[in-house]
Amino acid sequence: MKNSRKDQKAGNKSGRRPLSSKRGKDTKNSKPGFAKEKRKHIDYVDSKKKGDPLPSFNEDEVRLNKYLSNAGICSRREADVLIKTGVVTVNGEIITEMGHKVKPDDVIRYDGATINAETKRYVLLNKPKGFLTTMDDPMGRKTVMGLVRKACRERVYPVGRLDKETTGLLLFTNDGDLAKKLTHPRFKASKVYQVELDKKITSIELKKIVAGIELEDGTTRFDAAEFIDPEDGRLVGVELHSGKNRIVRRTFEALGYKVMKLDRVTFASLNKKDLPRGRYRHLTEKEVSFLKMTPNT
């Protein structure tokens, strides 16, 4: 991977977006790499920007077709057909009325089975360092769950994990099917990290990372490895699909380097644009649809 000005002007013929591009910035005016946060104190609360999609947590009633859709039975349009055919009951009564609303304590049955529908939530966090990716910690240490506890009424779970000192994107959801898809090796969810090393690395060693490094649990190959700043050989960007534990740190350690800072700037099709460190936001319907429609290959 050459970084000459001539190559930069010529563009990337492969069509791959440079890892040192602006997609990983935390703030509008920060440079590629690690932006220093000047704030001494951060309030870990949701951003209140105008236009952010906010779930309505206080809805006591929902339409029956939406309830069936949220339960994963079918789409809303298909649910309308099921309701018309009289195969759905509410509290033992067959419902064929379009627009019928149900309450949280109603008993809804379809095809003889009781349905338990919970609204699906998708929360994206820009994780700060110092937080464990776990549901709870017996030692009382800070966990990422404390950062998203006010995000929604439903109980959400982290998709994959980032270690305590790693920062960046972490997705939470109660959609088990999507979580399983995003963490399954066949899905090949792309992840891009910005890495700061303890000393300069050579372009030859970056090529080794792409060609393959032998670790204790097998050979690991990154999809790409580039210098973020040609003038600073300690800052590199890497792209990979592997979900192995501490894979980035272990790969550089195998080459004799220590990772000083590690920041995940993209996950699948998601990025950190307009999402400050320590804040979270809900995914838009378009983002959720894109994640769901990406085929397993």
Image (cartoon, rainbow, N blue to C red):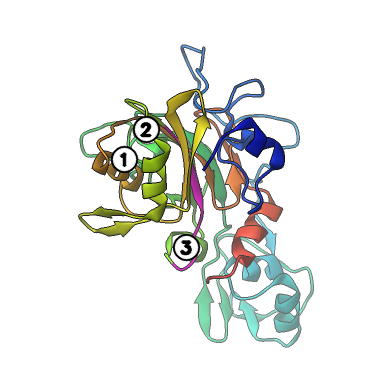
Camera-nearest label, 2 or 3: 2
Whether residue 191 is in magenta: the answer is yes
Q: Secondary structure at mark 3?
A: helix
Given residues 158 and 226, the one toward you in this image is: 226
| Residues at circles 2 and 3 in contact by the CB criterion of under 8 Å | no
| Residue drawn at the location 68% of the way across and 60% of the way down | 62
Q: Amino acid at mark 2?
A: Ile
Residue 273 appears in the rendering: no
Residue corresponding to mark 2: 201
Q: Position of residue 140 (x, y in %)?
A: 25, 32
Taking 63 as reference, is 6 above or below it? Answer: above
- For the residue carrying disc 2, how many other residues have a C-alpha within 10 Å: few (<14), some (14-19), or many (20+)? some
Q: Secondary structure at mark 1?
A: helix
Given residues 204 and 212, the one toward you in this image is: 204
The answer to whether residue 48 is left or right of residue 122 is right
| Residue drawn at the location 62% of the way across and 29% of the way down | 47
Which of marks 2 and 1 precedes in the sequence?
2
Residue corresponding to mark 3: 176
Q: Position of residue 270 (x, y in %)?
A: 59, 47
| Residues at circles 3 and 1 in contact by the CB criterion of under 8 Å | no
Q: Secondary structure at mark 2?
A: loop
Say which mark, if any, is on residue 252.
Answer: 1
Q: Position of residue 279 (x, y in %)?
A: 54, 31
Q: Amino acid at mark 3?
A: Gly
Q: Which residues are magenta?
A: 186-195
Which of marks 1 and 3 precedes in the sequence?
3
